[in-house]
Amino acid sequence: MYFKRLGLGPMANFIYLLGDEREKKAAVVDPAWEVNEILKVLEEDQMEVSHVFLTHAHPDHSNGVEEIKKKTGAPVFMHPLEKPWEGDWAKDTEKIKHEDRIRVGNLECEFLHTPGHSPGSLCIRVGSHLVSGDTLFVGACGRTDLPGGNPEQLFSSLQMLAQLPDELKVFPGHGYGPSASSTIGVEKKNNPFMACREKERFLSFFAI
């Protein structure tokens, strides 16, 4: 498996490159901020962009979509409930839903619908890795006070992720935590949002 994490932009964003090293095919997850740098890394690794995946459409995760589409011609995939805040590129996207699977070369990617931070938020499970977008951070979770955010949905999404194998490695959409990655097991133990099993108590974390 080909897997790289790039820290780009002023908001500690993580952009992920994942794919099949033998087939030289790669997907870019959440292209933003510095598309030329993303493509430079892929070119150096002799990888061709075959897919673009969005964990969600907030501008800090998607402001490079139009540029990367223009430069690579790769199709863009996101959940049908997701709507970009700016630009009209969404009309040309492919739709993916919960438990859909897409192959990048011979690498299978499974998509999990995890609403809460936004209506169409997705996590991507590939091998022993989970790219969790802004649903799950190291030690925290995504905010719910932006348009389309919903703390009850986020509670359900985190409870669903908690059922995944403890050894699954978590790769979030931002470097906000004490480390750049974690595991489901560690987050179940140490992350107060994921460890919480009572919905009312969870919702109290978001009360204004």
Image: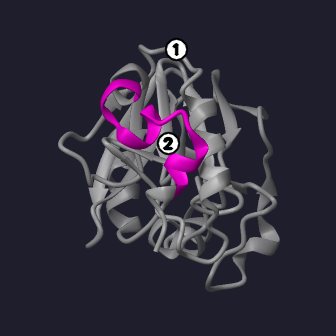
Residue 199 image point, x, y percent: 60, 44
Q: State which tag comes first along the sequence, 1 or 2.
A: 2
Residue at 81% over, 73% down: 91
Q: Nearer the viewer, residue 136 or 94?
A: 136
Q: Amino acid at mark 1?
A: Pro
Residue at 32% over, 41% down: 138
Indicate the secondary structure of the residue bearing disc 1.
loop
Residue 118 image point, x, y percent: 63, 63
The vertical placement of 130 against 70, above or below, is above
Please tell me how crowded label 2 is: few (under 14), some (14-19), or many (20+) other residues with Cα within 10 Å. many
Q: Nearer the viewer, residue 52 or 46?
A: 52
Indicate the secondary structure of the residue bearing disc 2.
strand
Q: Amino acid at mark 2?
A: Ser
Residue 152 visible in rendering: yes
Which mark is drawn over residue 132?
2
Where, by quadrant of the figure, is residue 78 drawn? bottom right
Q: Nearer the viewer, residue 91 or 157?
A: 157
| Residue receiving disc 1 | 165
Compared across the picture, whether 74 is left or right of 26 comes to: right
Residue 115 visible in rendering: no
Q: Nearer the viewer, mark 1 or mark 2?
A: 1
Which mark is drawn over residue 35?
none
Q: Which residues are magenta?
A: 188-203
Q: CA distance from mark 1 to mark 2?
A: 14 Å
Q: Nearer the viewer, residue 106 or 33?
A: 33
The vertical placement of 165 against 196, above or below, is above
Residue at 59% over, 58% down: 151
Residue 157 image point, x, y percent: 63, 42
Q: Is residue 206 magenta?
A: no
Compared across the picture, whether 55 is left or right of 187 comes to: right
